[in-house]
Image (spheres, rainbow, N blue to C red):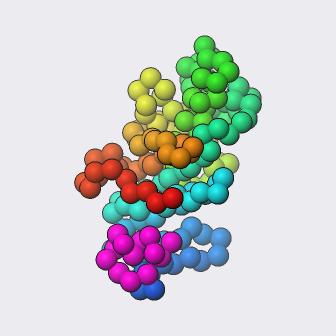
Amino acid sequence: MRQVLAAHLGLEPQAVPLQSPPGQPPALPEALGCLSLSHGGGALLIGWSPVPIGVDLELASRHFDAAALAGRFFPAREQQQLAAQMGEPLREAVLRSWVCKEAAIKWRHRSIALELSAWRYDHQRALLCHGVEGTELRPRLGALAGFLWAAVGEGIEALPGGPLTWRL
């Protein structure tokens, strides 16, 4: 992680002031930007940004009961948007929603257990909406090497520097 960050920060890997207290996500001093991590399926996604960021990564082929997951954790308004979908299109839509919501929860440093049902992904507008606080965010979504990823943060879609940097 220090090696990847060193290239972006212009430092030697051992000089990257990464803080990783037990039970908390790794962080950098505020002047060096914000971090978010996600891992699974043998992959690691490191999100770095000058503004707060949240990222999530899931295997695109991950199998799960999409209807049951949406019925249990998604707000009624989002369930209505998904009602006409079945099979693979439903699974893909639920997975897209899930990575966006998990990235938003990480962005806010909140608990997935407390926040998951508060977020609604508007599938027509590709927009995340917090049902209690009214926050609206446009996540960045993508796919790479069999994974689906999302990055969330205020203004993140307008950050300079072009595309995200990937290392496999």
Residue at x-position 54% and y-position 50%: 56
Q: Is residue 19 above or below residue 139?
A: below
Residue at x-position 51% and y-position 78%: 19
Q: Is residue 103 above or below residue 49?
A: above
As for residue 85 lying within the magenta part, the answer is no
- In the image, the segment drawn in magenta is 1-13
Q: Is residue 153 above or below residue 67?
A: below
Asked if residue 145 can be seen in this view, the reply is yes
Residue 74 left/right relative to 103? right
Residue at x-position 59% and y-position 77%: 21
As for residue 5 lying within the magenta part, the answer is yes
Asked if residue 72 can be seen in this view, the reply is no
Q: Looking at the picture, tell me which residue is in the foreground, 99 or 119.
A: 99
Residue 52 left/right relative to 160? right
Q: Looking at the picture, tell me which residue is in the foreground, 83 or 92.
A: 92
Which residue is situated farthest in the bottom direction here? 14
Q: Is residue 8 above or below residue 147?
A: below
Q: Position of residue 85 (x, y in %)?
A: 61, 17
- Main structural element of the magenta stretch: helix, strand or loop? helix
Q: Position of residue 10 (x, y in %)?
A: 31, 77
Residue at x-position 53% and y-position 47%: 145
Q: Position of residue 166 (x, y in %)?
A: 43, 56
Which residue is situated farthest in the left direction here? 160
